[in-house]
Amino acid sequence: MNSDQLGLVVANHADGCQDTFELFERKQTGRVSRTWLLANLLLSLLLLGQLIHGFRTEIAIGLPITRPLLENYCALIRCQIDFPRHLALLSLESSDLRVNPSYRPEVVILQAIIRNHAPFPQAFPALLLTLTDQDAQPLASRVLTVKDYLDPGADNMGFAAESEMVIQHFLDTGALDAMGYRLELFYP
């Protein structure tokens, strides 16, 4: 046996003598290496599949050419490729809440302009409207979802990249004596 096949430990003594000890014999077989290689390859493929599944929305945005493949994949396993929800890339450009003289005085019109600053389409946000009294204390609040402000026949292709959207919604405030309001964007 040569030193490549044996695990050798050489000890040097202070007087210059060397002792050699055999610890174990190494057995090299191609079968064990191939088994580990196959197992590692299989586990790597499973990890890659999990990453693709978990980041399918981001992949579809970053590599639009992969979207049809990802949609076919999702049709097969019954998942969805949702639009991203980056609230920091949305802004409420302006808003107005006023009484419309052609309606009853308790009916008000909410108008708002929302801007998507992202270079990709996003999911439509929800709006939280809070009516306040003269001391800015909340009287009532309502969440407006995309169903409330988007036309039912509109194509839901997401909030287009780098675009603005004008929202108009009629609200019946009833007997509330609201003097102000707050409007916030959020994702449910």
Image (tube, rainbow, N blue to C red):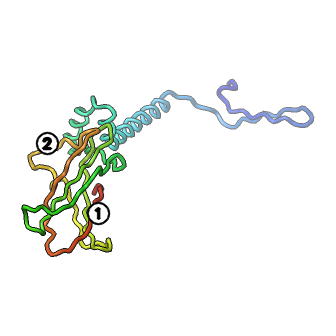
Q: Where is residue 135 in the image (x, y as percent from the top left)?
A: 32, 74
Give the residue at x 12% y 65%: 107
Q: Within the image, what quadrant is residue 47 found in?
A: top left
- Which residue is the extreme one toward the right? 15
In which image quadrant can residue 56 be found? Answer: top left
For the residue labelled by badge 1, is the local secondary structure a helix, a strand or a loop? strand
Q: What's the amino acid at mark 1?
A: Arg
Label pair 1/2, CB-CB below 8 angstroms: no
Residue 182 marker: 1
Q: Name the residue under label 2.
A: 155
The residue positioned 30% from the left and 58% from the top of the image is 184
Image quarter (top left, top right, bottom left or bottom right) of the C terminus: bottom left
Measure how far apart labels 1 and 2 are at the Cα level. 29 Å
Q: Where is residue 170 in the image (x, y as percent from the top left)?
A: 13, 60
Rendered image: mark on residue 134:
none
Give residue 153's position: percent from left, percent from top. 8, 46
Front position in the image: 80 or 100: 100
Does 132 sit left or right of 152 as displayed? right
Which quarter of the rendered picture does the N terminus lie within?
A: top right
Give, as a three-letter code, the residue at label 2. Asp
Question: Considering the numbered disc 2 on the image, is that residue within a helix, a strand or a loop?
Answer: loop
Of residues 158 and 2, which is closer to you in this image?
A: 158
119 over 88 or under it: above or below: above
Q: Which residue is drawn at 64% across and 33% down?
A: 25
Assess disc 1: are there few (<14), some (14-19) or many (≥20) residues with their C-alpha within 10 Å of its C-alpha.
some
- Against 2, residue 126 (above or below) is below
